[in-house]
């Protein structure tokens, strides 16, 4: 894949750091931000971005960074892709908003068709509903599953992240902190062990035998690859086993592809790696390159089970966000999904040698496509690697208990991947060679970097 010229960097290399990090303007802005914004926002480290182009981000001090976080796996086509920006501008000049809950907005139906046609759904015939975010789509799927099946219970998984709204956070089980102080949560939710074929025995041995009969389970919701929980890839046969359990008991299978979908894993949807077709599939994040859009694609008969007024949204399927989604889908189908597969292979080949080079520090390298997780021996070492990478101009994000994720935009070039792998290896080497006083960790803590609770998703 040939990368487009970087309009932001010009002749400058990327990354290119011209001040200490954080720089003086960044420090001033952090102080300003902390005066006015909600302290609930878990900022990973003191980055203050003001411009972006492709995988290049410029901060408020003029430093250039190589972005391998992509706004938590959101900017699938890179920052400000010309085709996406052009579609947004054109649509904004026609109509900014019209509620599809009340009127027949043409671009809403077109976007539903495009997303539904590229989504593998059990039974073949699918329809779609559009909203604003991933958490909103999770909430919608809970409502639909309970309404369509007339059953009360939903099963999620240990390690899962589905969002922070009440229903979504009730399904989330990646960190106890997400629940702390907010109980009681949504009733009727069970959490199963994730990832191993052996874990599927839990459904018969524990859930159906001791907790709730199978005919009262409305849905099983699963991330095909767990995201914020650590970029955990299930064993082959696990998702197929879930599909079989659902088929046997009339349970709906919901695939939460909010982070793993939109081409990120080298296929349009992660479930395609295992040939599994869910009854409901959820997408958001990368499907509109950063514009607020989520979609729930479901078997047509499920959506047809509820009538007018059963669910809706004032802003869901906003025409400008829909325009961005249509442009994004064109780019994904035009080569970005294939590029994610190729650059993902490059990433795995470049990262796996770290396992032999630093066996006491690096415990695992895993993922599919451009959804890559590197597991470290401790949460502190993961935090230090994230900070060391930031100090060298590479943006990555922690996930899980002790992992760092690399999730760049799908437009990433071979050269950009090579640069990122070099910087990441240098960051790991710096941690491996530091003394027991952990100066890198202390520097991160002094600058306000947060260990353990990242901007999740």
Image (spheres, rainbow, N blue to C red):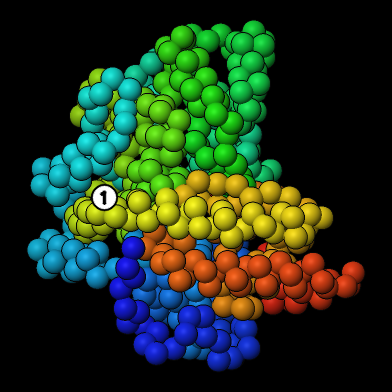
Q: Left or right: 131 with respect to 50? A: left
Query: Which residue is at 39% across, 75% downward?
Result: 52
User: Would you say residue 36 is visible in this rendering?
Assistant: no
Up/down of 326 relative to 51, above or below: above
Residue at the right extreme?
436
Q: Left or right: 41 with respect to 354? A: left
| Residue 228 spot, x, y in % from top left | 57, 48
| Residue 4 spot, x, y in % from top left | 30, 73
Label 1: few (<14), some (14–19) or many (≥20) C-alpha neighbours in 10 Å: some
Query: Which residue is at 65% across, 18% downward?
Result: 202
Mark 1 highlights which residue? 333
The image quarter in which residue 307 lies: top left
Up/down of 219 relative to 385, above or below: above
The image quarter in which residue 204 lies: top right
User: Would you say residue 7 is visible in this rendering?
Assistant: yes
Q: Left or right: 412 with respect to 422? A: left
């Amino acid at each position: 894949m040939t990368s487009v010229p970087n309009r932001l960097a010009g002749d400058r290399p990327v990354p290119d750091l011209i001040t200490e990090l954080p720089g003086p303007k960044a420090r001033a802005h952090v102080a300003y931000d902390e005066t006015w914004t909600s302290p609930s926002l878990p900022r990973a480290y003191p980055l203050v971005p003001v411009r972006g182009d492709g995988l290049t981000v410029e901060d408020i001090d003029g430093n250039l960074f190589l972005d391998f976080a992509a706004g938590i796996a959101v900017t699938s086509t890179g920052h400000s892709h010309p085709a996406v920006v052009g579609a947004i501008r054109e649509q904004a000049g026609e109509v900014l908003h019209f509620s599809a809950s009340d009127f027949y907005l043409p671009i809403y139906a077109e976007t539903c068709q495009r997303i539904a046609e590229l989504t593998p759904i059990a039974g073949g015939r699918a329809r779609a509903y559009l909203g604003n975010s991933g958490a909103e789509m999770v909430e919608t799927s809970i409502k639909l599953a309970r309404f369509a099946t007339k059953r009360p219970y939903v099963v999620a998984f240990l390690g899962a992240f589905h969002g922070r709204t009440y229903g979504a956070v009730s399904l989330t089980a990646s960190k106890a902190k997400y629940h702390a102080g907010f109980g009681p949560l949504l009733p009727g939710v069970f959490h199963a062990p994730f990832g191993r074929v052996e874990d599927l025995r839990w459904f018969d041995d524990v859930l159906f035998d001791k907790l709730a009969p199978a005919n009262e389970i409305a849905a099983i919701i699963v991330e095909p690859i767990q995201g914020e929980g650590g970029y955990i890839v299930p064993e082959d046969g696990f998702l197929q086993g879930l599909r079989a359990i659902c088929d046997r008991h009339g349970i709906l299978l919901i695939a939460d592809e909010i982070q793993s979908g939109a081409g990120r894993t080298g296929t349009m949807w992660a479930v395609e790696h295992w040939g599994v077709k869910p009854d409901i599939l959820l997408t958001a994040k990368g499907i509109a390159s950063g514009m607020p859009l989520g979609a729930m694609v479901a078997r047509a008969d499920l959506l047809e089970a509820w009538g007018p007024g059963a669910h809706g949204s004032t802003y869901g399927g906003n025409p400008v966000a829909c325009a961005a989604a249509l442009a994004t889908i064109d780019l994904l189908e035009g080569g970005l999904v294939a590029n994610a597969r190729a650059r993902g292979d490059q990433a795995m080949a470049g990262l796996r040698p770290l396992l032999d080079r630093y066996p006491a520090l690096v415990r695992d390298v895993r993922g599919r496509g451009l959804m890559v997780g590197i597991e470290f021996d401790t949460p502190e070492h993961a935090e230090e690697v994230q900070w060391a990478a930031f100090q060298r101009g590479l943006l990555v994000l922690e996930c899980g208990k002790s992992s760092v994720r690399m999730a760049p935009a799908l437009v990433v070039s071979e050269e950009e991947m090579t640069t990122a792998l070099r910087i990441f290896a240098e960051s790991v080497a710096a941690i491996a060679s530091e003394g027991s006083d952990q100066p890198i960790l202390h520097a991160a803590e002094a600058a306000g970097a947060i260990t353990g609770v990242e901007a999740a998703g």
